[in-house]
Image (spheres, rainbow, N blue to C red):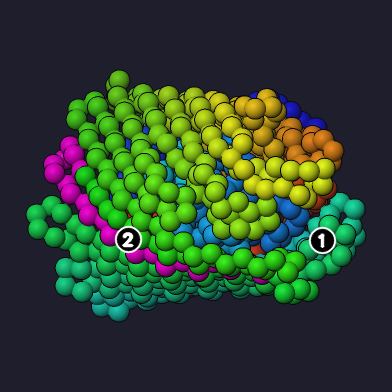
Amino acid sequence: MSSPVHSFTVCLALLVSAAAEAAAPVEEQIIVTATRVPTPVEEVLAPVIVIDREAIERSGATDVTEVLRFHAGLDVTRSGGPGQPTAVFIRGAESNHTLVLVDGVRINPGTIGLAALQNIPPSMIERIEVVKGPRSALYGTDAIGGVINVITRRGARDGWSAEVGYGDYDTRQASLNGGFGLGRAEADFGVSWLDSDGFPTRTTDDTDRGFENLSANLQLRADLGPASVALRHWRAEGTTEYSDFFLTPVDQDFETATTSVEVAVPLAGSVAARFTASHLDDRIQQNQAPDYLQTKRDTADAQFDWDFSKTQSFSAGAMFAREKASSESYGDLMDSDTNVVSLYAQDRIAVNAHRALLAVGYTDHETAGQEVTWNAEYGYTLAEGTLLYALAGTGFRAPDATDRFGFGGNPALEPERSRTLELGGRHRIGAHHTLSLAAFRNDIEDLIEFVTTSYDPFDGENRNVQQARIEGIEASYEYGDGPWRARVEATYQDPRDRTSGDLLLRRSQESLAASVSRTLGSIELGVDVLAVGDREDFGFPEPVTLDGYVLANLTARWQVTRSVSLSGRIENVFDEQYELASTFNTPDRGVYVSLRYSPGGAPRAAYSAEARTDRTEHSWVTD
């Protein structure tokens, strides 16, 4: 098996070759998730990842987590094939320490804490924004490791497109996206369908287990006098098949839906206000038993933004959420209602070579009590294109309803709390090359763990007994110049249980991700490489070690005509045999192709920087 070092050498050679070319400057990107207001990426001090529509299309992925995993520092695990439960560990933090938003609406359930990223089809996504590090000051609970914000497409601005595809494991997919203008209003529409026969979930099984997902989104936006109003709805529903512990074929139906209405209106002077109301409905229903999980959450959010001058801006807001979580598991019923109130304030200053951000949040959680969290960030520009920064912040995660009332439930649990420090720098070489380096440490206390109280391993309760420290270094290099695009990211981290000294489970110490693409006329070719080191995982009686692995995907896209394009992807080119979770299968080498029709549409690569910026400056979800 190739080593991560060998893969890094190969990718670096490709990048050096690419750097010999010359062309247009890198386009400016806008991000909202880091500060809750649209901000150019270059002005954000926190480490962020922005995956735009062009990168999503080039990946050819059928699952949003397949897009995320090709970035270092994002460890992805999955218990089997398509549609199986998926977890994302950001910089070694727990998987339930990642807050996931769809168009700004929280989709983390109140039952088990893991957002169903595997149910979000890439065909409906305009962009993905990832913020690494704590953001509880702005978002409240769960945002310890970071935030992932999935932003759905804006068909009225991008035009209509239809796509059909087929691939290994009898995977069939189809999607339709588009929209139209209505004077001072716009309407967007999208629908996506995927059906796969899959493969056996467990390594000791030989029964294929499939996945079916039907997703749709609808958006209506209008200018009503000085106010802007947006109504958004997204829904994913389908069936996931799997094999249980005893290798019995079973399946469950799922449904996740978000609905929100947002009103943005300018007030006196330089003050702007935004009011949002949203609803989440998340449900999993077991088909061979009455077992189920359900979360219903209503949220109201009001935010006010002041632009005092070109050098200072201030934001403040309040959020109220009412959550109802219920479940049935092997006859045990759980029903919990929780109210949460959050207040937040943020001040940003940029004077000459200095940049600073200070954010403070206060959360009153009905069951977890009161928490005060903060972020303090400072950056100094040494010279044009060179930035040094220092970040500090705290985060927390309130115990969910399952922690408190499910198996091993303990209503007296305290929140999990974190404190993070980071030092780093970014350097731009000309208009085409960007280097970054960062060192971070995250101390997490009061981690919740099931503790046995007798010789029976199933007799016990959840307790705040664990402490963890995650220290690491990240480095990245990006190149963008005309027909070439290239990226290399490397992470070394040491995620440790401070009590036992053991490595935290399912997180690698080293990972490297590289991507290179080249446009040759109407053809675009690409390669994505991911190298991950050994990881520890659950085992009995002792943890087991999962071997490291190297994955490589080849992609190609041919713009046959202005309206028709043909895409292909060879996944896992070297047919690497590996595990993301012990005793669970992963896909072998596979081939996937798709045909896309966009009537009258030009290739996305032909969009100008001005057009892309215009599409991202109006809404807090960067539409």
Q: Position of residue 189 (x, y in %)?
A: 45, 74
Which residue is farthest bottom?
182
Examine the rendering and report whether any part of residue 121 can be seen: no
Q: Which region is colored magenta? A: 292-313
Q: Which residue is mark 1?
A: 244
**Which quadrant of the figure has residue 405?**
bottom right
Q: Earlier in the sequence, mark 2 or mark 1?
A: 1
CB within 8 Å, label 2 to label 1: no
Mark 2 falls on what kind of element?
A: strand
Q: Is residue 299 magenta?
A: yes
Give the left or right position of residue 54, taking residue 167 as reference: left
Which residue is located at x 60 percent, y 46 percent? Answer: 95
In this orientation, does residue 455 appear?
Answer: yes
Q: Nearer the viewer, residue 507 or 491?
A: 507
- The residue lying at 46 percent from left, 61 percent from top is 338
- Callout 1 amino acid: Asp
Against 442, residue 70 (above or below) is: below
Q: Residues within 10 Å of mark 1 (few under 14, many from 20)?
A: few
User: At 13% from the left edge and 44% from the top edge, which residue is drawn?
Assistant: 308
The mark found on residue 301 in the picture is: 2
Name above or below for residue 180 compared with residue 554: below
Residue at 73%, 69% in the rendered image: 331
Q: Position of residue 368 (x, y in %)?
A: 47, 50
What's the mark number on residue 475? none
Of residues 197 and 401, the one nearer the viewer is 401
Q: Name the amino acid type tagged 2.
A: Asp
Left or right of 135 on screen, residue 450 = right
